[in-house]
C-alpha cells in the first residue's frame, strides 16, 4: 500500500530525503526478518514494502538487507542503521503521543458532534430523525469566508456549486450519508474547504436517496452531473471526483460505470474514509458485523441495494476489476470502522495496476475531514488533497488550504 505523502526527514548528507515510512518499513523487516510478516504488520502489500526498502537503500547508497529465497538478514550497514532508526522512531512516537493527549479534546469534540447521528442510538430506527440529526451536525461546519454558493441544475439533477467565484466547477463531490442521509446544502462547508484546498470550484449534486430511490438512482444522478460538467466545456482530464463515506463508494461505482460504458474518465479520484464494503454488509459477512449498530447499518445498505443483486461490482467495488481507473487518493482514519474495507480497496487497486496514494490518520472519527475548522488532522488531510490534485491537474501548486 503506497503512501506517497508521508512526513519527510531531511538529511543534509543525501541529495534526496528519507521518508519516515522508509524507516518504519526497514525496522519492521529487520524485526521480523520476513517480508510477508512485516507487510502484514504494516498493513502493506509485499510489493509495496519491497519498493520502500529498495528506495531506502538507494537513498543511503548501500544494501541494508540480504535477501534469498529462504532467508532475510541484516548487512553490517543495516545493523548500524537499525538501532538509530529505532531510537528516532521511538522519540517521534513519544512526541506524537504527547501531542495526541493534548489534541484528544478536539477529537472528542468531533465525536460529540457525531453522537446524535450514530447508528445504534434510540433514534436510529427513525429515518426522518436520522436525516435531521445528520443535517444538524453538518450545519455546524462553517463555510470558508471566500466561498460562494450557487444553485445549479446539472442534467436534471439539483446541485450546489461552491467556490471562490462563478467559474465552472472542476471537482464533482458525492456526499456521504450511507445513500440515505445528507444533502448538497449540508455539505457546503466541506465543499468550500475542498474548493480552497484544490483551487477549483466544487459541484455537489443532490443525488436521490434510498429507500425512496434505491440503486441505481444515485449512480444515475452522479453520471448525469458528470456529463453535464463536460457539456459545459470542462474537459474530463480537468475534472476530479471526490466522495466521503458512502459517497466514496459512489465515486468508485461512477468510475466503473464510466469505464464500462466507454465514457471518458476524469483525472483522478479522492476518497475520504470511503465506505465500500457494501456486499459484505448486506449479507452479514463484513467485519463491521461486530460493531454496535450493525443491524441498522445493514438495513440502510439493503435500502440502497433494493432488489438489485448484491454481487454487482457497481454496488460492491471490492469485487470489481479496477483495471484502467485513474489515480486515486484514499484517506483513512485509524479508529474508523470502515478503514478495513478502504485498505482492501487500496490493495485491490494496486493489484489491478491503478496508481494509489493511501494515507492513514491517527483519528478515531469517521469522515474526520468534515471537522476541518478545528481538527488539525483534517486540515493536514485537505492540504494533502491539494497536493495530490495539483499533480493530476498540472498545477504548479495547490491553493493554500483553509
Image (cartoon, rainbow, N blue to C red):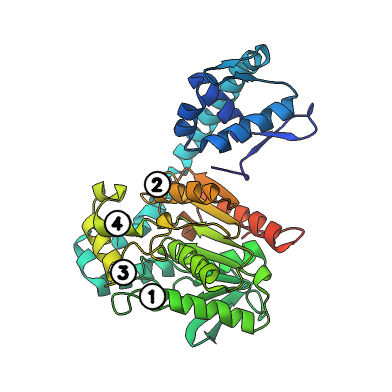
At x 52%, y 18%, the residue is 70
In the rendered image, the vertical position of residue 375 relative to residue 200, given as above or below: above
Relative placement, left or right, of 101 versus 1 is left
Give x and y (percent) for residue 26: 58, 26
Residue mark closest to the camera, 2 vs 3: 3
Say whether residue 143 is visible: no
Crowd tier of the residue under label 3, counting other residues whose Cα lies within 10 Å: few below 14, some 14–19, many 20 or above: many
Say whether residue 298 is visible: yes
CA separation, marks 4 and 3? 11 Å
- What residue is disc 4 on? 281
> Marks 4 and 2: in contact by CB < 8 Å?
no
CA separation, marks 2 and 4? 13 Å
CA separation, marks 2 and 3? 21 Å
Sequence-wise first label, 1 or 4:
1
The number of numbered discs placed on residues in the rendered structure image is 4
Sequence-wise first label, 2 or 3:
3
At x 36%, y 49%, the residue is 337
Sequence-wise first label, 4 or 3:
4
Crowd tier of the residue under label 1, counting other residues whose Cα lies within 10 Å: few below 14, some 14–19, many 20 or above: some
Which numbered disc covers residue 305?
3
- What residue is disc 2 on? 340
Q: Secondary structure at mark 4?
A: helix
Q: Secondary structure at mark 1?
A: loop
Q: Which quarter of the image is occupied by the C terminus?
A: bottom right
Sequence-wise first label, 2 or 1:
1
Which numbered disc covers residue 216?
1
Sequence-wise first label, 3 or 1:
1
Q: Secondary structure at mark 3?
A: helix
Relative placement, left or right, of 48 versus 54 is left
Q: Secondary structure at mark 2?
A: helix
Crowd tier of the residue under label 4, counting other residues whose Cα lies within 10 Å: few below 14, some 14–19, many 20 or above: many
Residue mark closest to the camera, 2 vs 1: 1
Amino acid at each position: 500500500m503506497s503512501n506517497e505523502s508521508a512526513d519527510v526527514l531531511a538529511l543534509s548528507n543525501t541529495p534526496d530525503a528519507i521518508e519516515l515510512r522508509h524507516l518504519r518499513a526497514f525496522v519492521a523487516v529487520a524485526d521480523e526478518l520476513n517480508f510477508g510478516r512485516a507487510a502484514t504488520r504494516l498493513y502493506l502489500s509485499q510489493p509495496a514494502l519491497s519498493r520502500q526498502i529498495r528506495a531506502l537503500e538507494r537513498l543511503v547508497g548501500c544494501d541494508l538487507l540480504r535477501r534469498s529465497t529462504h532467508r532475510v538478514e541484516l548487512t553490517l550497514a543495516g545493523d548500524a542503521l537499525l538501532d538509530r532508526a529505532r531510537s528516532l522512531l521511538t522519540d517521534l512516537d513519544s512526541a506524537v503521543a504527547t501531542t495526541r493527549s493534548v489534541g484528544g479534546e478536539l477529537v472528542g469534540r468531533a465525536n460529540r458532534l457525531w453522537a446524535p447521528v450514530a447508528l445504534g442510538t434510540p433514534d436510529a430506527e427513525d429515518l426522518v430523525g436520522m436525516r435531521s440529526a445528520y443535517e444538524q451536525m453538518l450545519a455546524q461546519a462553517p463555510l470558508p469566508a471566500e466561498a460562494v454558493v450557487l444553485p445549479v441544475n446539472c442534467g436534471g439533477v439539483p446541485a450546489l456549486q461552491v467556490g471562490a467565484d462563478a467559474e465552472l466547477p472542476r471537482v464533482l463531490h458525492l456526499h456521504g450519508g450511507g445513500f440515505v442521509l445528507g444533502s448538497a446544502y449540508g455539505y457546503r462547508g466541506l465543499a468550500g474547504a475542498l474548493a480552497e484546498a484544490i483551487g477549483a470550484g466544487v459541484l455537489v449534486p443532490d443525488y436521490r436517496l434510498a429507500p425512496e430511490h434505491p440503486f441505481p438512482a444515485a449512480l444515475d444522478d452522479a453520471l448525469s452531473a458528470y456529463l453535464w460538467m463536460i457539456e459545459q466545456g470542462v474537459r474530463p482530464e480537468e475534472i476530479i471526483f471526490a466522495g466521503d463515506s458512502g459517497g466514496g463508494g459512489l465515486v468508485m461505482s461512477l468510475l466503473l460505470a464510466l469505464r464500462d460504458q466507454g465514457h471518458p474518465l476524469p483525472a483522478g479520484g479522492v476518497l475520504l474514509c470511503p465506505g465500500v464494503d457494501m456486499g459484505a454488509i448486506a449479507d452479514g459477512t463484513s467485519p463491521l458485523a461486530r460493531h454496535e449498530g450493525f443491524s441498522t447499518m445493514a438495513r440502510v445498505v439493503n435500502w440502497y441495494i433494493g432488489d438489485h443483486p448484491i454481487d454487482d461490482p457497481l454496488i460492491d467495488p471490492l469485487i470489481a476489476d479496477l483495471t484502467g481507473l485513474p489515480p486515486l487518493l484514499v484517506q483513512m482514519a485509524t479508529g474508523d470502522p470502515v478503514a478495513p474495507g478502504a485498505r482492501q480497496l487500496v490493495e485491490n487497486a494496486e493489484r489491478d495496476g491503478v496508481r494509489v496514494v493511501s494515507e492513514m490518520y491517527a483519528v478515531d472519527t469517521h469522515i474526520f475531514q468534515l471537522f476541518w475548522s478545528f481538527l488539525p488532522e483534517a486540515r493536514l488531510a485537505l492540504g494533502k488533497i491539494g497536493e495530490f490534485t495539483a499533480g493530476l491537474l498540472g498545477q504548479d501548486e495547490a491553493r493554500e488550504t483553509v
